[in-house]
Image (cartoon, rainbow, N blue to C red):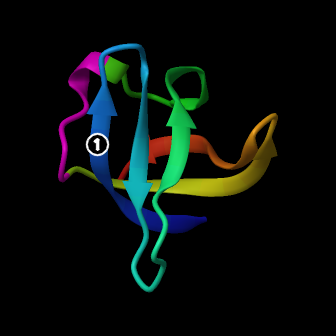
Amino acid sequence: MQEGTIARLMDKGYGFIRREGQSKDLFFHSSELQNVAFNDLREGDKVTFEEGQGMKGPQATNVSRA
């Protein structure tokens, strides 16, 4: 599992995770959330996740609040 911080949340049920040492934030979709609702997340929250391949490139999977 990797760790990161919620960088941005979008109204349509997705957002981006900032990873230390990486210049590009990682996309995540609310369908990949584990044990937390999308509406309960806030920018700046610490999360754990796995990195997978989505239809449009790399994305976070199995996202949980740390």
In terms of secondary structure, where does tag 1 sit?
A: strand
Q: Is residue 19 magenta?
A: no
Instruction: Name the residue at 49% across, 67% down.
Output: 24
Where is residue 23 drawn, in percent x and y? 45, 76
Q: Amino acid at mark 1?
A: Arg
Q: Main secondary structure of the magenta part?
A: loop
Task: In this rendered view, identify the residue nearer to me: 37 or 12.
Answer: 12
Kindly identify which residue carries mark 1.
8
Instruction: Name the residue at 61% across, 65% down.
Output: 1
Where is residue 40 drawn, in percent x and y? 23, 24
Which residues lie in the magenta part?
39-44
Task: In this rendered view, identify the residue nearer to me: 13 or 49.
Answer: 13
Q: Quadrant of residue 64?
A: top left
Where is residue 38 drawn, in percent x and y? 35, 21
Instruction: Name the residue at 31% across, 50% down.
Output: 6
Task: In this rendered view, identify the residue nearer to me: 65 or 59.
Answer: 59
Q: Is residue 5 left or right of residue 12?
A: left
- Direction bottom: furthest residue: 21
Q: Is residue 37 left or right of residue 51?
A: left
Instruction: Name the residue at 48% across, 78% down.
Output: 22
Where is residue 36 drawn, in percent x and y? 38, 27
Q: Quadrant of residue 65?
A: top left
Which image quadrant: the C terminus?
A: bottom left
Q: Is residue 38 positioned above or below 26 on the image?
A: above
- Density class for disc 1 (Cα within 10 Å; few <14, some 14-19, many ≥20) is some
